[in-house]
Amino acid sequence: MSRLGDPGVREVHPLVARLLVLQASGFRGDARAGIAHLRSIGELPELEFVSCLACGLCCQMHDYIEIQDGDLARLESDPIGAKVAACADPGSLRSSQPRFDLTGCGRTCPAFQGPHKGCGCYEVRPQACRDFLPGSNACLAVRVAAFAERDRS
């Protein structure tokens, strides 16, 4: 039986490990709910600091971004923002949940210019991106998904 620390066994990120323990104890909910629960009971593991610009996972791990009032007009006023506006899902624009479809872009926002460069249309970015705060439960949930993906490979 292999154990963490044995040669050939990759260690799991501490946040992923804590969420797996929480799930095994019967907790029902997604990563965001699990992070909120761990935070509320004071058991969120200490995480290494990763600056927003060095990370960029929030720009690379979504299939869709919700469109809110003013997003399209603001984005279309910027050459790079127009690339994001072009991802608007035509079928969703008349629905109650309009969205940008990033699946055709490999789940990476076309305005993302890479780690250490960030968003190419930061000043006109969609409201959903403005609301996505560094270190928030949503941010940590995206990081958990990336850590879990990395740990599986």
Image (spheres, rainbow, N blue to C red):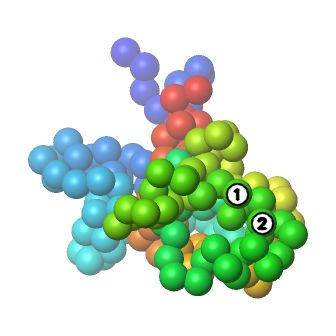
Q: Residues within 10 Å of mark 1 (few under 14, many from 20)?
A: some
Q: Position of residue 55 (x, y in %)?
A: 70, 61
In the shown orientation, is residue 34 left or right of residue 119? left
Front one among 37 and 91: 91
Marks 2/1 in contact by CB < 8 Å: the verdict is yes
Front one among 47 and 63: 63
Q: Position of residue 128 (x, y in %)?
A: 53, 74
- In this view, 69 is above or below 86: below
Mark 2 vs mark 1, CA separation in Å: 6 Å
Q: Position of residue 90 (x, y in %)?
A: 54, 53
**Amino acid at the residue labelled 2:** Ala
Residue 7 visible in the snapshot: yes
The residue under the point 82% across, 56% down is: 114
- In this view, 118 is above or below 153: below
In the shown orientation, is residue 5 left or right of residue 81? left
Image quadrant holding the N terminus, namely top left
Image quadrant holding the C terminus, namely top right
- In this view, 120 is above or below 144: below
Q: Secondary structure at mark 2?
A: helix
Q: Which residue is mark 2?
A: 82
Q: Position of residue 103 (x, y in %)?
A: 59, 42
Quarter of the rendering containing residue 54: bottom right
Query: Furthest residue to the top?
Result: 1
**Amino acid at the residue labelled 1:** Ala
Q: Which residue is mark 1?
A: 86
The number of numbered discs placed on residues in the rendered structure image is 2
Front one among 59 and 153: 59
Front one among 52 and 69: 69
The residue under the point 35% across, 55% down is: 31
Q: Secondary structure at mark 1?
A: loop
